[in-house]
Each structure stands twice: as structure tokens, then as C-alpha cells.
Image: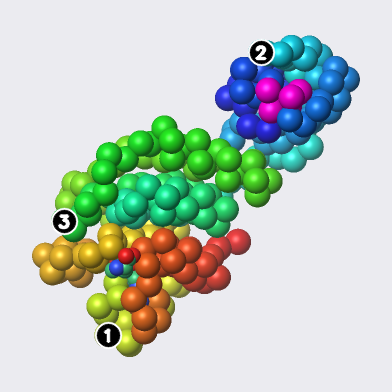
Amino acid sequence: LYVDHPLGAGQTVPLERAQAHYLFGVMRQTVGGQVALFNGRDGEWLAEVTRAGKRDGELSCLEQTRPLRMPPDLWLCFAPIKKARTDFIVEKATEMGAARIVPVMTEFTNAGRVQTDRLQAHAVEAAEQCGGTYVPEVAEPVRLDRLLDGWDGARHLMFCDEALAAEGGGAGLETRGPWAILIGPEGGFSEKERARLGRLEAAVAVRLGPRILRADTAAVAALTLWQLALGD
Ligand code: SAM
């Protein structure tokens, strides 16, 4: 269970209404029962239920069962698409070990308002589901040109583009260090954006096979390729 509260030996952890409902109403936990907790910072802790109310409750940390496992320094930058598919991307990026998720507004992005709070909640759920001890931060949306203006040259960029020649392939995914993956919107990147990304020294252009993948599929394929080449 994810809690936004410090975890440590003897630490008391209060539960909010939704968490109490889930633990005591859905999971049928009672006082004395044991629950694994994580907060994205302190690893995983075994905790005991000390109070079980209808609307709230309390747990007490017993011992650390797993240390915090930080993912590699990999960002997933992607142009938001339809709501359900954007949710899917955030969920899969969390499962696939992205450290930070960055919605990027490109020229052809036509998604509605990006609700980062909702996306962050999806990342928490995905981390809970896959037994992670870390939750990636979902950043506020940023325009692609602003993102590239401030690009730290030390971070390599895996720029995924279906319009590349076949020989664009996965070559160049060898250098270790901080990385980011960039996935475009349903309409792809504009020629202006392609030209700018082509001039970015830190960028490695990657083609994910001969077919045009949906953006959500491309995100999962790119994360898989990166993990295979450089992940731990
Ligand atoms: N119209 C489809 C959709 O509705 O999702 C296709 C979108 S595709 C243009 C979206 C993004 O996925 C591209 O900008 C690119 O980043 C990535 N992508 C798709 N197929 C790819 C491929 N074969 N190689 C590299 N990137 C690809």
C-alpha cells in the first residue's frame, strides 16, 4: 500500500478515508493484521494495523522488508494523446522503470488539458501493482521548444520517429548515463521539430521497426528497447 508519510522503525502511519476503506472494507484487514507499505522514498516496510475505523485508521511500522530501489535515470517524454491512452502510457512507463514522466506539448499535440494529479495517481497505482518501491514523478506539461531550450547536454535523448530511414535503427543506445525517450503525438512530429531534434547533439534518432506504431505502443516499445540496451 502506498502512503504519503515517512516510514521507519516504530513510525505511526495514519490512514485516510480511501485507504481505510480499501484495507478494512475491501481487504478485510483488522487490528493486528500486517500490511506492506511504501512511500517512494523509504523502501518497503511491514506494518501492523493498530486502529481500524470506518473512515480512518492507523498502522505502526515494524521492520523494513526491502530497501528503496531507484530506477535508472530515464525520463519518458511523450506528447499526451487521448485520456485513456495517456493513462496507459503513464502506467506502463511506471512498470517499465521510468524515473520521471514528462508530458510534452508538440506542434501537432491536440490532447485536452493534462491532469497531472490524475496521472500521478495512476503512477502510484502502477507502482503498487508491480511491487515497486519507487513512484516516478509526473511533471507539469512543457512545450517541446521550451524543453529543448533548457536541455542539459549530458542527458541523451532517444528520439523516436517513424519517418526515419530504415538504417536509423537502434544504433547509438550504448552510452550510459542519464537518458530520456521522446515519443510524438498521433500526427507525429512536424518537419520543424524534426530538424531541431536532428541538430540536438545529445539526440539519438531511433526507428522502432517498419510500421507506424500508435503512440502508446511506441512508448512501450521504446522503453523495452532502452531497458534491453542500457537497463539494469
Ligand atoms: N496515428 C497513430 C496514432 O494514432 O497513435 C500513430 C502515431 S505515431 C506518429 C506517434 C509517435 O510514435 C511518433 O511521433 C513516434 O514518436 C512514435 N512512433 C510510432 N511508430 C514509430 C516507429 N516505427 N519508429 C519510431 N517511432 C515511432
Whether residue 85 is visible: yes
Q: How many neighbours does mark 2 have within 10 angstroms: few (below 14), some (14-19), or many (20 or more)?
A: some
Between the C-alphas of marks 2 and 1, the distance is: 58 Å
Image spot of residue 84 (x, y percent)? 42, 50
Q: Can see residue 10?
A: no
Magenta part of the protein: which range?
21-25
Farthest right residue in view: 32
Q: Nearer the viewer, mark 2 or mark 1?
A: 2
Question: Residue at point 51% right, 42% down?
Answer: 123
Q: Nearer the viewer, mark 2 or mark 3?
A: 2
- Secondary structure beneath dot 3 equals loop
Q: Horizontal placement of 10 versus 201: left or right?
A: right
**Residue 165 badge:** 1
Which residue was labeled with disc 2? 55
Quadrant of res 156 = bottom left
What's the magenta bit mostly, secondary-structure-wise?
Answer: helix
The image quarter containing residue 3 is top right
Residue drawn at the location 70% of the way across and 40% of the way down = 67
The residue to which callout 3 is attached is: 107
Give the Cα separation between the discs numbered 2 and 3: 46 Å
